[in-house]
C-alpha cells in the first residue's frame, strides 16, 4: 500500500482570519488521524502555497498525494487549475508521485445538513405529531431514511444494512462510515442460512440479536474460565472470551460491538491461521484503540467483514447489522 499524503487546497485570502480557518481544520485533522502527512496549500494570497505544501509531503516520504479542494462547487479552480498546479509541483519535487483529486467539499451530500442546521433557527416550525398506525411506523421511518440518503452512492447489496443501522441509531453518519469487505453481505447471508452459530463479545449484543429463526447466539464473557484467563494473562475478559472460543469461531458469524481488545485478538488469530470466521461484524465504540482496531480489521484479505470507521459504534449497531442480514436471509 502506498504511503499517502493529503493536501487540502484553498484559494487564499487577503484576510488572515480566513486563512487561519483552513489551517485550524488542518490541525484538527492531524490530531484525529495522528499523522503529519496532511498539509494545506493556498492557490494565492497566502502561505504556504501549493508548491511548498507538496514539497513538505514529498520530504516526509509520501508516495501518493490525495488532493481535497476546500471549495464549494466544481468550478474552473477545482477541475482545471488545482490539478495542474499540483502536478507541476510534483514534477518539480518528485516526478513520479501519483496524484488523486477528490470532489470539492461542498459537493458532499452532507452539505445539506449544514444548510439545514444554519437555517433551523430561522425557518423551524412547531413540530407536528404524526398519527401513524403501529404497523406502518417502521415503513414510514424507512421512507424518511430513503429521502435523506438520496445522493449517496450506496451499492444495492448493502443498502438494507445501512438503512437498518441508521434506523436503529438515528444517526445518518453511518451512511458514510460503514465499511463492507470481501462480499460481506452475500457471505453473511449464506452462513446464516446454514444456521451457523453467532458469537458475541458482550451480552448486550447477544440480547439484541433476532433469534426467531433458531440461531444459536453465544457469549462466554462471564464464564468462570474466561475470568480466570483474563486475570492470569492480564487481558480483558472480552479478549479472553475470544481466545477461549478458539476453533468454535470457524465458519461462524462473530459480532463485536463493545470491546476493541476482542477485535484485536480476533484479527490476530485470523492472521495466524488459527480461526476462519464466515463473517466478522465489528463496531466497537470508544476512544482507546476502537478506531485503530477497526482499521486493523480492514487489513484482512480473506475474511469478509462489516465495520465502521471512527470512534462511534456499540452493541446496538453490531446487533442491527446482524439483524439486517437475518432479515435479508429469511424474510425477503
Image: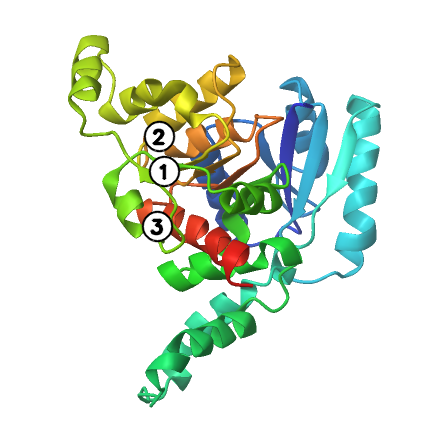
Quarter of the rendering containing residue 108? bottom right
The residue tagged 1 is 284
Tell me what residue is drawn at x 51 percent, y 57 percent. 330
User: Could you tell me how far apart the alpha carbons at marks 1 and 3 are, in whole angstroms?
Assistant: 16 Å
Q: Which residue is drawn at 32% across and 35% down?
A: 287
> Quick one: label 1 or label 3, which is nearer the N terminus?
3
Q: Position of residue 73 (x, y in %)?
A: 69, 62
**CB within 8 Å, label 2 to label 3:** no
Report the residue marked by disc 3.
209
The local secondary structure at tag 3 comes to: loop
Q: In which quarter of the image is residue 179?
A: top right
* Pointer 2 or 1: first along the chain: 2
Describe the element under mark 2 as helix, strand or loop.
helix
Q: Are marks 2 and 1 in contact (CB under 8 Å)?
A: yes
User: Alpha-carbon distance for marks 2 and 1?
Assistant: 6 Å
* 93 with respect to 227 (left or right): right
User: Mark 1 near mark 3, Cβ–Cβ under 8 Å?
Assistant: no
The span from disc 2 to disc 3 (Cα, nearest Å) is: 20 Å
Residue 251 in view: yes
Is 169 situated above or below 232?
below
Q: Which element type, helix, strand or loop, lies under badge 1?
A: loop
* 159 relative position to 218: left or right: right
User: Viewer-proximal residue, 50 or 119?
Assistant: 119
Q: Mark 2 points at which residue?
A: 260
- For the C terminus, the image quarter is bottom right
Q: x, y percentage for residue 217? A: 33, 41
Amino acid at each position: 500500500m502506498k504511503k499517502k499524503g493529503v493536501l487540502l487546497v484553498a484559494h487564499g485570502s487577503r484576510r488572515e482570519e480566513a486563512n487561519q480557518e483552513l489551517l485550524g481544520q488542518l490541525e484538527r485533522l492531524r490530531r484525529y488521524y495522528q499523522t503529519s502527512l496532511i498539509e494545506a496549500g493556498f492557490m494565492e494570497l497566502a502561505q504556504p502555497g501549493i508548491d511548498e505544501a507538496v514539497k513538505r509531503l514529498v520530504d516526509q516520504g509520501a508516495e501518493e498525494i490525495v488532493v481535497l479542494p476546500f471549495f464549494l462547487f466544481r468550478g474552473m479552480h477545482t477541475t482545471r487549475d488545482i490539478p495542474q498546479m499540483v502536478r507541476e509541483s510534483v514534477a518539480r519535487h518528485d516526478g513520479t508521485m501519483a496524484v488523486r483529486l477528490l470532489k470539492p467539499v461542498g459537493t458532499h451530500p452532507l452539505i445539506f445538513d449544514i444548510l439545514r442546521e444554519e437555517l433551523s433557527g430561522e425557518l423551524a416550525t412547531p413540530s407536528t405529531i404524526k398519527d401513524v398506525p403501529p404497523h406502518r411506523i417502521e415503513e414510514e421511518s424507512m421512507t424518511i431514511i430513503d429521502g435523506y440518503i438520496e445522493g449517496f452512492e450506496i451499492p444495492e447489496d448493502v443498502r438494507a444494512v445501512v438503512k437498518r443501522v441508521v434506523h436503529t441509531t438515528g444517526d445518518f453518519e453511518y451512511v458514510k462510515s460503514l465499511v463492507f469487505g470481501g462480499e460481506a453481505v452475500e457471505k453473511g447471508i449464506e452462513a446464516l442460512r446454514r444456521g451457523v452459530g453467532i458469537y458475541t463479545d458482550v451480552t448486550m449484543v447477544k440480547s439484541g440479536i433476532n433469534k426467531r429463526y433458531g440461531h444459536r447466539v453465544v457469549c462466554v464473557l462471564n464464564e468462570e474460565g474466561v475470568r480466570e484467563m483474563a486475570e492470569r494473562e492480564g487481558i480483558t475478559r472480552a479478549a479472553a472470551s475470544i481466545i477461549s472460543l478458539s476453533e468454535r469461531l470457524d465458519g461462524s458469524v462473530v459480532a463485536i460491538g463493545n470491546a476493541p481488545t476482542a477485535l484485536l485478538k480476533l484479527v490476530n488469530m485470523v492472521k495466524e491461521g488459527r480461526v476462519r470466521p464466515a463473517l466478522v461484524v465489528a463496531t466497537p465504540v470508544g476512544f482507546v484503540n476502537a478506531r485503530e482496531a477497526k482499521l486493523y480489521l480492514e487489513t484482512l484479505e480473506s475474511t469478509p467483514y462489516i465495520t465502521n470507521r471512527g470512534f462511534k459504534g456499540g452493541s446496538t449497531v453490531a446487533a442491527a447489522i446482524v439483524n439486517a442480514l437475518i432479515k435479508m436471509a429469511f424474510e425477503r
